[in-house]
Image: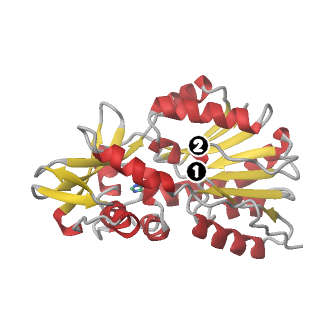
Amino acid sequence: MTAFSAARARPARDDLFLSDVLEGLSRPDKSLPCKYFYDAEGSALFDAICTLDEYYPTRTETALLHARAAEIAGLAGRGATLVELGSGSSVKVRILLDALDAPALYVPVDISRDHLIAAAARLAGDYPAVTVVPVAADYARGFALPRGVAPERTMAFFPGSTIGNFRPAEAVAFLQGLGRRLGAGARLLIGVDLRKDPAVLEAAYNDAQGVTAAFNLNLLARINRELGGTFELERFAHLARYDAARGRIEMHLRSLDDQTVRIAGHPVHFARGETIHTENSYKYSVPGFRRLAARAGWRTERSWTDDDRLFSLHWMVR
Ligand code: AVI
């Protein structure tokens, strides 16, 4: 039975985009929320990043999921509900759906509505025994689960080290909120990128083909498309560097000139060399991440890493 339903999908909160952009660009240290990377164009660029030689997280996590799929299936039990946060193209979840014992329900949650609906429709076609209920929402702000989902059958899946895009205090608050939403007895399988040689990290965010640069600059292109912005993309440059003290990659867009840009009629001035901070990507140690999760009420039952200790997966229980 194909039981694909888009009924719960709701429009993303586009009305917030302009106010978030103007607020971020009026700060002394200009910044933009990284969630706005993911329009259709940005989601396609992110998919391309995931295939790059330099971007080790995707292939390493994928190999880890394959290696541990049977063990994860044993932990998840029969008839599980899988809730994926930031499901994107719903690629990695197929490894779990192939291994789990009769998974009943798959709830992909993503902010990029059109991408979500298309990915959910493909998945529903490929897994006719699984009911697929896509939820178009900014999962960091909260979302509604389908009614009747039993917490002890539920397994949240948060791959890709997207948790690294939150500041640690925000990550704790987010994981706490997620635990409350899912309920006592719920499980969480989460992928977390690890601290390592800064040269490896910096290469992953400065790929030779310039795909990450295009992904970063697409944020300005999106502002032009959706908010009537006048950014000239060639007057900004992609910048990504590792801050070892904070354990994070920072991405910025650096203004190459002294210039004024208009967004929905509002002027925004950039000095030459001034940057817009567009993303943080925190890297953790295994014990460091387990401590963070514990502060949010999640007990880690298993942690797995690849042999090179590039990336980690954690099975947690609330
Ligand atoms: C989605 N997120 C985990 C990616 C990361 O590595 O922080 C986003 C990304 N930014 C640049 N490349 C990939």
Within 10 Å of the Cα at label 1, are there few (<14), some (14-19), or many (20+) other Cα atoms?
A: some
Question: Quadrant where the C terminus lies?
Answer: top right
**CB atoms of marks 2 and 1 within 8 Å:** yes
Q: Is residue 298 visible?
A: yes
Q: Nearer the viewer, residue 273 or 282?
A: 273
On the image, the x and y values in percent for residue 38 come to 47, 61
Amino acid type, callout 2:
Arg
Q: Which residue is mark 2?
A: 141
Q: Which residue is mark 1?
A: 138
Distance from disc 2 to disc 1, alpha carbons, whole Å, reads: 6 Å
Quarter occupied by residue 237:
bottom left
Q: Nearer the viewer, residue 303 or 184?
A: 184
Left or right of 269 on screen, residue 87: right
- Disc 1 secondary structure class: loop
Question: Quadrant where the N terminus lies?
Answer: bottom right
Q: Residue shown at 69%/41% (left/top)?
A: 188
